[in-house]
Amino acid sequence: MADLPKDTDILVIGAGIAGLCSALYLARAGRTVAVVERGEPWGDASGANAGTLSLQVKRPEVLHITRRAIELWQDFKADFGIDVGFGRPGGLRVATNAREVDMLRHSQAEQRTLGIEVEWLDGNRLRDTAPWLGPTVLAATWCDWDSYSSPLQAGRALIDGARRDGVAVIGGAAVTAIAKETKGYRVTTALGVIACNTLVIAAGAWSGEVAAILGVTLPVSADVNMLSVTEPAPHLIDKVVTHIGGILSLKQYPNGTCLIGGGWQGQGGLASGRKEIDHEQLMHNFRVAIGVVPALANLRLVRSWSGFEGVAADALPLFGPLPGRPAAYVNACARGGYSQGPALGLLMAELISAGRTSLPMERFYPARFAS
Ligand SMILES: Cc1cc2nc3c(=O)[nH]c(=O)nc-3n(C[C@H](O)[C@H](O)[C@H](O)COP(=O)(O)OP(=O)(O)OC[C@H]3O[C@@H](n4cnc5c(N)ncnc54)[C@H](O)[C@@H]3O)c2cc1C
């Protein structure tokens, strides 16, 4: 484990996708950066997530961020020598009843007006594209951008990559107190005190807790998302699959395992720290998945788990300056934040280094919640 430096230019709190990507791009901008993490780096949502990078499931407000992020995911190897297990097979978003077909039409039209090309598939074209889909699937939209990366691979690779670029990534360093100094902040962690000029809160579902240490209220809650993985199987599902109405994300990795999730909720919450499987909800997840890809019924399940995903009151990212706290920023709570992580990291680096961002981000500033 790395030692805690006495000081740093920029201190990032939290070593998930938001914190590590912020650190990586800040280091590339020539800044000295340390990341302090309460537990193991990559030990929470980012390490537990499904790795789906789907553009067409995103809310219109964050489509531009997600599209930029997928470009960056794709370029990690070329830009940083970081192999995140990226694949871009494209994705199908399916509809299984008349109401969902209408919803899908509406979503396709909306995305087209925002410059995202999604193609309509039904009948023979749909069956030819994905013969493994079940008969309940009536139509789907196809998006060439939909991709995946491997969270298992990406975590290690991003931590190593950040360290290679000079970032100190320090686990076991829970932040417990923050004091404003004349210039910057003095941050107390479980491993000692570190001074910094600039602070970035990237503590995921706990970003509200960390902001509260600075006396700022952020409306953050957490979902308890569940995810399951099957035994390896012969290659069948050659696209990322999502569902307009049925809560599903599904894909088969190159090693043959299938990941089944989508956001079905487990039990527990931030207050108790419990995140447990809800078996009834899990059965719904499998029913939806098997309805869409019947061949899944023949596979054995290897493991199911759950993790906390931080959510702001309006389910949009918390990104930007912390109100009333100079040189303190937040990068947290993007819904499906793994997909958006690289872009939000790059944009945070731009904001801190240049005072402006290459994509419009003001609507995500935490000041929107200031009363
Ligand atoms: C089961 C599951 C499946 C998901 N699937 C997908 C998916 O397929 N695609 C997608 O885009 N998104 C998915 N998500 C959402 C995604 O994982 C999250 O949005 C994203 O990982 C959040 O990243 P983060 O860096 O903000 O938070 P985290 O990864 O949670 O990192 C925050 C870190 O801050 C640390 N921390 C907290 N408090 C302190 C403190 N006081 N001091 C120091 N460190 C602290 C935590 O320990 C943690 O490691 C999924 C989430 C879950 C749980």
Image (tube, helix red, strand yellow):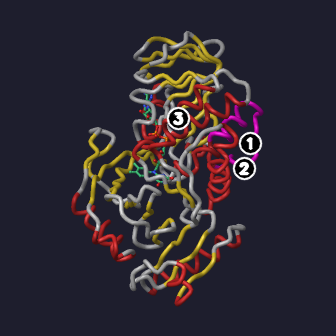
Placement of 248 over or under 203, stated as above or below? below
In 3D space, how far apart are the residues under numbered discs 2 and 1 (Cα atoms)? 7 Å
Amino acid type indicated by mark 1: Thr
Residue 350 is covered by the magenta coloring: yes
In the image, residue 191 lies at what x, y percent? Answer: 42, 14
User: What's the residue type where badge 3 is placed?
Assistant: Ala
- Which residue is at the far bottom? 123
Q: Nearer the viewer, residue 68 or 209?
A: 68
In the picture as drawn, the residue positioned furthest to the left comes out as 279
Mark 3 CB near ligand 1 (8 Å cut): yes
Query: Label 3's element?
Result: loop
Label placed on residue 357: 1
The Cα–Cα distance between marks 2 and 3, rounded to whole angstroms, is 20 Å
Q: Could you say where residue 306 lies in the image, as x and y percent from the top left?
A: 32, 49
Q: Earlier in the sequence, mark 1 or mark 3?
A: 3
View extreme (front): residue: 234
Relative image position of residue 293 (x, y in whole percent): 38, 74
Disc 1, SS: loop
Q: CA distance from mark 1 to mark 3?
A: 18 Å
Residue 254 coordinates in the image, percent (x, y):
47, 57
Report crowding for label 2: few under 14, some 14 to 19, many 20 or more residues within 10 A (C-alpha). Answer: few
Relative to 94, residue 208 above or below:
above
> Residue at coordinates 48% horizontally, 22% vertically from top-left?
170
Q: Which residues are magenta?
A: 345-363
For disc 3, the marked residue is 202
